Amino acid sequence: MAGKSPQNKAIVIGSGVAGLAVAIRLKVKGYAVEVFEANSYPGGKLTEISVNGFRFDAGPSLFTMPWLVDELFTLSGENPRQHFNYERLPEITNYFYEDGTCITSAAEPKQFAQEIEDKTGEPAKHVLRYLKKNAELFELTSHVFLESSLHQAESFLTGKTLKSALQLYKLDAFRTMHKANSSTFKNEKVVQLFDRYATYNGSDPYLAPATLNMISHLEFNTGAYFPNGGMHHITKSLFELGKRLGVTYRFNSLVKGIIVQGGKATGIETEDGIIPADVVVSNMDAINTYRKLLPNVKAPERSLSEPRSTSGIVFYWGINKSFAELGLHNVFFSADYKEEFRHLSELKGIYHDPTIYLNISSKMAPADAPEGMENWFAMINVPPNTGQDWEALKAQARRDVIKKLSKILKTDIEPLIIAEEILDPVVLERRTSSFQGAIYGGNSNGRFAAFLKPANFHASVRGLYFCGGSAHPGGGIPLCLLSARITADLIAKREPRHEA
């Protein structure tokens, strides 16, 4: 019989984007797949909320590498364009500085470079050379660090990997992002703009290795996109694809433990009893998986003890006005970036002049807000939850964010807020099981951080696997989708097949 019999069963714990993707991949490989989700909805952080006529994408808002979503439809024998569509953004982000400077990053690199030269005096050729270097760095390393398991020897024995090993000097891992950017650009505004890419995985540009400067390549050389229907449509489309394939979803189903017998994961324990399986994949945060579901299994303490990434406070505001100067993605920079990150890295709380990321999906999807109004997703980076007084910090942050936006936009923002929801690290952890509310798992502030992410498999427990932002290769939609691919491929190689 082609494929595997229904006895080859996989259980996926958690329906974040990686959980949805790995379920699809395992179903295509012939497994009977059940997904157990503690919430009443799929998506994890990639969900949505609605408040008084305003719709918000609750979590991730930047979309790159859309072909990783398309791939899941293609593998399933479907045309992605019949179920999931998106458009490339001609302009990516508006950057606002305290002195009134505004830089718009066009998607076309030459146009963006010229904009920087016009606004800051930094030669366009410096920007183009920098982006070209980052593209080369990504091509050199992506198949090693992003598309393969770093925890098995065979990943390092391919021709491509050996070729990359001979060029490791290009990784620039011994300088920080900030030092590399400062040596590349003379204008401080340009340095700050490219330093910001450390925040894409919850890290600090003054500590993270310059290797991470390759992140900018994904926006400027491969493009930034907006899914039709908003970011939550990624979740919706993958969930519906899984259902069409025959994946079973169990919502409001809290997993109490992973059953391990004789060095083999044999199922899970729920409130309804023991559910047997041949393979168990956790899309839950790795720390909480080990601490709560595998208390008697040896954990990779070195990986789990790595410092957490930043978290965030998000203000979901319905704004009773439209601002022509704002776009889909907007950043309002702190006047003292180094001090802001010192507060974050030292867990001091929230700097009084935070950098604000403002996403307005109604710029692309007008139905997300009533006519003449806008839905603002205003986010600042904050430390992970280590017991801070978040009620006081949220009140402080709200005042600081409103003050800063009002100053730069020359409009009193507070009277315009007619709908509001707030997300903080405590709520984030409760909703998504992200340890300490850290958005991206461990941070990437060390030069060897890529090697210290929890592995996608357990070294001594057969049938036990991990995917998602807290596991290799890391957080963010593209990396979570790659994590699902790595995990599914490992299962196909390592797990015995049962015949019908």
Image (cartoon, rainbow, N blue to C red):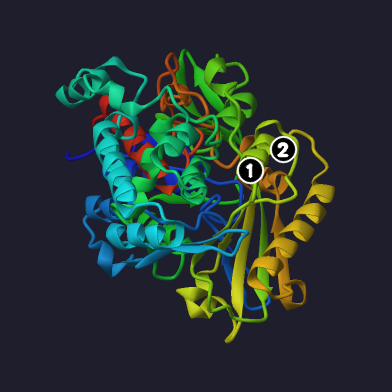
Please tell me whether residue 97 is drawn above or below residue 18 in the rendered image: below
- Residue 228 location, quadrant: bottom left
Screen quadrant of the C terminus: top left
Please tell me whether residue 385 is drawn above or below residue 363 in the rendered image: above
Screen quadrant of the N terminus: top left
Left or right of 165 in this view: 477: right
Q: Mark 2 points at which residue?
A: 385
Kindly identify which numbered label has been placed on residue 73: none
* Disc 1 residue crowd, few under 14, some 14–19, many 20+, Cα 10 Å: many
- The number of callouts visible is 2
Q: Which residue type carries mark 2?
A: Asn
Residue nearer the viewer, 311 or 14: 311
Residue 340 lies, in percent from the top left, at: 66, 42
* Disc 2 residue crowd, few under 14, some 14–19, many 20+, Cα 10 Å: many
Report the residue at 50% width, 31% height from top: 208
Report the residue at 50% width, 40% height from top: 198
Residue nearer the viewer, 414 or 462: 414
Left or right of 69 in this view: 210: right
Residue 382 lies, in percent from the top left, at: 67, 44
Q: Name the residue under label 1.
A: 311
Q: Which residue type carries mark 1?
A: Ser
Please tell me whether residue 63 is drawn above or below residue 16 in the rendered image: below
- Whether residue 4 can be seen here: no
Secondary structure under tag 2 reads loop
Do the residues bearing badges 1 and 2 touch, measured as CB atoms within 8 Å? yes
The residue most toward the front is 121
